[in-house]
Amino acid sequence: MKKRIVLVSLAALFLLQTPSHDEDLWAASLTKARAIAAILEESYYKPLEEEDLAVASIKGTLDTLDPHSYFLDPASFSRMREEYKGKYFGVGMQIQKQGDNIVVIAPIEGGPAWRLGILPGDVISHINGESTVPISSYDAMQKLRGEKGTQVTITVVRDGADKPFELTIIREEIPLLSVPYAFLLDDGIGYIYIRNFGEETPRELEDGLVKLTAQGMKSLILDLRLNTGGALAPSVEISDLFLPKGSLIVSMKGRNPAYNREFPAFVDNQYEKLPLVILIDQGTASASEIVSGAVMDHDRGLIVGEDSWGKGLVQTVFPLAPNMAVALTVAKYLTPSGRSIQRDYSQIDDYMMSKRAPDDSREVRYTDRGRKVLGQGGITPDYAVNSLLKPFTGRLRLSGAFFSYARRLVQHQTDLGRNFVFPQDAKDAGAAAVGKIQVGTVFVVNADVVADFRKFLGMRKVEYDEKTFREAEPEIRWELEREIAGAIWGVDAGVRAARKNDPIVKKAVEVMPEAARLLEK
């Protein structure tokens, strides 16, 4: 079987280099592949692993195609299925690389790590005895995942603990929500974030819409930033929620007629008249661009943010074995106006750096109301907003400074923190709480907090000049507000605080009346 895979892979490579695909050429290519396989087996200077050769042949073949046709080894195939199914087996905690450390952002409530007492701010120094210093957060996440019922041992370094300690955790099924946040902003504006498009995404989104409608939602911000896509079917279902019955959502065009399809909206529902603004950025790709493109081309809502990635190709997964597969591009997709949003990938370095063609070289199409839209470069928003942090703020965030300070403040480990009684310690503060400030439902980042944070930076020997700090101070206050809210009231509260200060969200709120006017006939 392995040798057959090698032969087929080599034959495919030959076929890609020929102008025709008839049976004679296929037979000739197989003959060449057999000859090469025989030469390798007989004459190569050391023994060959046939499976390694097969995988290398497959990868080499796919590398000659496009950036989105790729080989799925057992680990990546498993991750793809986990993303689509919306669940995985692991310990249940969000982690992040901060400097050399793998830091727990939050344990998932009810999960195995949460039940064993893992806390936000804990440092995972070792996983199964191996140091986490040289590995990324992604690699650490993979080490923490595994088969259901298996064990993983972690070493935890905790502020206030005398020494590191070990915990052995049994892996369980953990839900992987694709719609983790749904809440109301001011003035009845709903906010929903979609992380990716999987099997459960339409149901999760509808649950969020029902919840917010019951709370008085009058309009919606749908956040698709950093959403790299997923499956086609969920993106069509989600678009259908907001578009009138019969509206074209997306079409596919492939060399094989079997992949030529159109996907219209099939049902009418209550959300078709809900004023809508969609948020995008350079991390918005594929399925999330299908939703954005359908809404834009039908003038159903407004798009705010940054140019999206520009992935307009459709892949089908072809299994090679129970735990291996090939994701092969079988078609391009077109938005309702007929535009392809796929960026040029002939210069792969430019493609990976998000470079796009000048506007005057891109195809022009028109929306239902006659607005000009461009193809071949992702989705260009109706309102462009730059959300990049200043370099100093970005450096502080990347180092975990805001996160670490917030945890120290709430644990009374800073000068200012010792003046407060927080909700989580009020029940046993007793006489020690006399004369201190009780924190209720709001915590304001004022000048005293900023001064306390600067002391913290001094302790960490973070160097900066006054001008740099002063210019970044508004962003620093926003970052502190987010992390302190998260430390006091949980991750959801931190996300709410972040969205309140988010320049792209602010712009979406500002243009919501215009989005409402699009619904007027």
Image: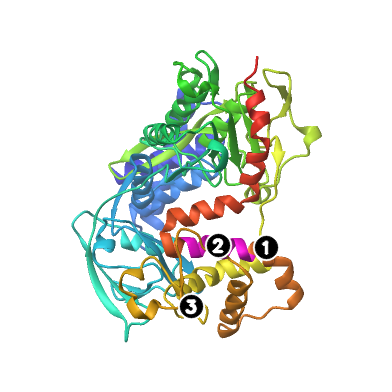
Disc 3 to disc 2, C-alpha distance: 18 Å
Look at discs 3 and 1 and give the one toward the viewer.
3
Residue that numbered label 3 is attached to: 419
Q: How many numbered marks appear?
A: 3
Region in magenta: 476-485
Which residue is labeled 2 in the image? 481
Q: Quadrant of residue 102?
A: bottom left
Which of 419/190 is in front? 419
Q: Secondary structure at mark 1?
A: helix
**Residue with the mark numbered 1:** 474
Q: Is residue 514 positioned above or below 97 on the image?
A: above
Q: Quadrant of residue 358?
A: top right
User: As displayed, is residue 75 above or below residue 479?
Assistant: above
- Residue 45, visible in the rendered structure: no
Disc 3 marks which amino acid? Asn
Query: Is residue 71 among the parts visible in the rendering?
Result: yes
Mark 3 / mark 1, whichever is N-terminal: 3
Instruction: Name the image quarter holding residue 362.
Output: top right
- Looking at the image, is 318 positioned above or below residue 411? above
The residue sitting at 47% across, 31% down in the picture is 235
Which amino acid type corresponds to the residue marked 2 in the rendered image? Glu
Majority SS type along the magenta span = helix
